[in-house]
Image (spheres, grey):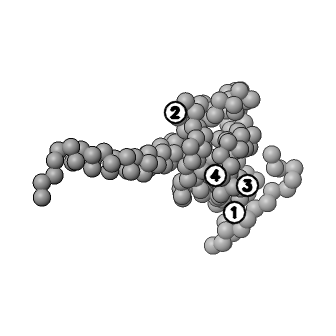
């Protein structure tokens, strides 16, 4: 059986058309993972100016670089980040969510191991993924533009744990410490 060059080209193009969404999704997930990892490394190395540059434009408009870096600098004496585990990445259009666990050591008021279980939300602006975690207004706006994604992956509050002996115990700070 002889297959013409035209049929071969059509088969290849057809395969590419069906594979394109899978490749695009894999690329988006890889970019999102890379962004989350890069920002974590910037936080860990206390490069707060670079973390600020990774925020969405709306967040940068509401908070100056000096205020943002100052607040992170003041907090650096309370904890030390060690490592991060990334779970599933979900991307839909210009919004993504990544399940993460951040591990570190609390040094003030008591020295102990700690972890934060948090969904990292990212938004795509000008072709770049930006970390919107903690910016509820930006996240809500993007989720409103993609209600199916928002229903499937609603915003969950971070959960903080401290290690006591061999067990992780959820830590609920007093209301005066939350903000």
Q: Quadrant of residue 136?
A: top right
Q: Viewer-nearest of labels 1 and 4?
A: 4
Inter-mark Cα distance, 2 to 4: 20 Å
Badges 3 and 4: C-beta atoms under 8 Å apart?
Answer: no
Disc on res. 173 = none
Separation of residues labelled 1 and 2 (CA atoms):
38 Å
- Mark 1 / mark 3, whichever is N-terminal: 3
Q: Residues within 10 Å of mark 2 (few under 14, many from 20)?
A: few
Circle 2 sits on which residue?
Answer: 127
Residue beneath the point at 27% across and 46% down? 10
Which residue is under mark 3? 157
- The residue drawn where x is 71% and y is 40% is 141
Q: Are marks 2 and 4 in contact (CB under 8 Å)?
A: no
Q: Nearer the viewer, mark 2 or mark 3?
A: 2
The residue where tag 4 is placed is 149
Say which residue label 1 marks.
Answer: 162
Between disc 1 and disc 2, the foreground one is 2
Q: Is residue 28 left or right of residue 162?
A: left
């Amino acid at each position: 059986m002889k297959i013409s060059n035209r049929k071969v080209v059509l088969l290849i193009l057809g395969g590419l058309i069906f594979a394109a969404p899978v490749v695009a999704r894999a690329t988006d997930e890889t970019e999102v993972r890379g962004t989350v990892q890069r920002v974590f490394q910037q936080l860990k190395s206390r490069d707060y100016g670079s973390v600020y540059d990774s925020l969405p434009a709306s967040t940068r408009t509401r908070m100056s670089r000096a205020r943002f870096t100052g607040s992170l600098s003041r907090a650096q004496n309370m904890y030390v980040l060690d490592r991060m585990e990334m779970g599933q990445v979900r991307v839909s259009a210009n919004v993504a969510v990544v399940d993460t666990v951040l591990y570190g050591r609390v040094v003030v008021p008591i020295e102990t191991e700690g972890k934060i279980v948090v969904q990292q939300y990212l938004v795509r602006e000008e072709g770049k993924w930006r970390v919107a975690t903690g910016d509820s207004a930006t996240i809500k706006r993007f989720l409103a533009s993609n209600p199916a994604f928002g229903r499937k992956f609603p915003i969950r509050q971070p959960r903080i744990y401290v290690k006591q002996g061999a067990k992780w115990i959820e830590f609920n700070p007093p209301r005066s410490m939350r903000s």
